[in-house]
Image (spheres, rainbow, N blue to C red):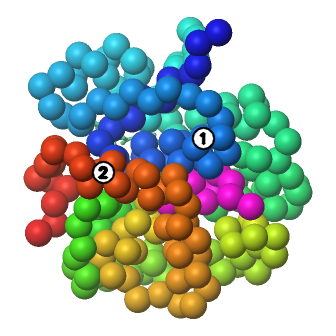
Amino acid sequence: MSLPVLHIGNKNYSSWSLRPWLLMKVLEIPFEEHLIPLFDENWDAEIARVSPSRKVPCLTDGDVAVWETMAIMEYLHEHHPGGRVWPENPKARAMARCAANEMHGGFTGLRSAMPMNVRKSLPGRGHTESALKDIARIETLWADCRKAHGSGGPFLFGRFCAADAMFAPVVSRFVTYGVDLQPVSRAYVEAVMSLPAMEAWIAAGRAEPWIIEHDEVD
Ligand SMILES: N[C@@H](CCC(=O)N[C@@H](CS)C(=O)NCC(=O)O)C(=O)O
């Protein structure tokens, strides 16, 4: 039987692609990766072939296509039960889903002022009022998750789960833009950045030749 295929965009820029990719790597869920460089000359034809929404990420598993990041997380949860994608504890699981969905639907101030760019170091850039407001909320959320359910490990709910995957691009942005953080957040950033899969994604992003002007704040 063939492996599911995760269709992703450029590793330097595609924050949505990083999320399911990292989750599957950390949880050792086997998959093949298909990278389509965003907006290059083959983009329109390639993305139309694999993703109904014409966006990445999209997971194809046989004749099933799953697009939208949160839908991919839930699909993986159904196919890999046992408290790996979401925490096993129901209270922790509810909070993890809230945190992940808050990330999915929000923090637009941060996302527009500090686009993910793993190969750059831009300390002090992008610190707009709305980005700082989002950052304050993220720090509170991370601290609440760690305090309530984080005793079993260094991640939001102890062991790495989908909520951590959702925040991995935020972690990367905090590093790129030199965001000043509380000690709890700093320790969490360190834990995510030290994941071998995160290091591998960043190394691959740094090696990419493509530049998307729109995502370059300098
Ligand atoms: N809501 C979508 C967002 C996906 C998304 O915006 N992906 C970007 C790349 S990071 C994309 O494919 N952009 C192409 C386009 O907008 O045409 C999700 O959760 O997966």
Position in image of residue 186 (x %, y %): 53, 83
Position in image of residue 82 (x %, y %): 85, 42
What residue sits 33% from the left and 38% below the top? 9
Position in image of residue 137 (x %, y %): 53, 78
**Most foreground residue, 106 or 88:** 88
Residue 156 relative to residue 210: left or right: right
Tell me the kind of residue under disc 1.
Met
Q: Mark 1 — residue?
A: 24
Residue 145 relative to residue 47: left or right: right
Q: Is residue 135 above or below residue 48?
A: below
Secondary structure beneath label 1:
helix
What residue sits 50% from the left and 35% below the top? 68
Q: Residues within 10 Å of mark 1 (few under 14, many from 20)?
A: many
Provide the major secondary structure of the magenta segment: helix
Tell me the kind of residue under disc 2.
Gly
Report which quarter residue 159 is drawn in.
bottom right
CB atoms of marks 2 and 1 within 8 Å: no
Position in image of residue 167 (x %, y %): 53, 61
Q: Which residues are magenta?
A: 159-168
Q: Residues within 10 Å of mark 2 (few under 14, many from 20)?
A: some
Q: Mark 2 — residue?
A: 205
Mark closest to the chain's N terminus, 2 or 1: 1
**Most foreground residue, 173 or 210:** 210
What residue sits 72% from the left and 76% below the top? 146
Secondary structure beneath label 2:
helix
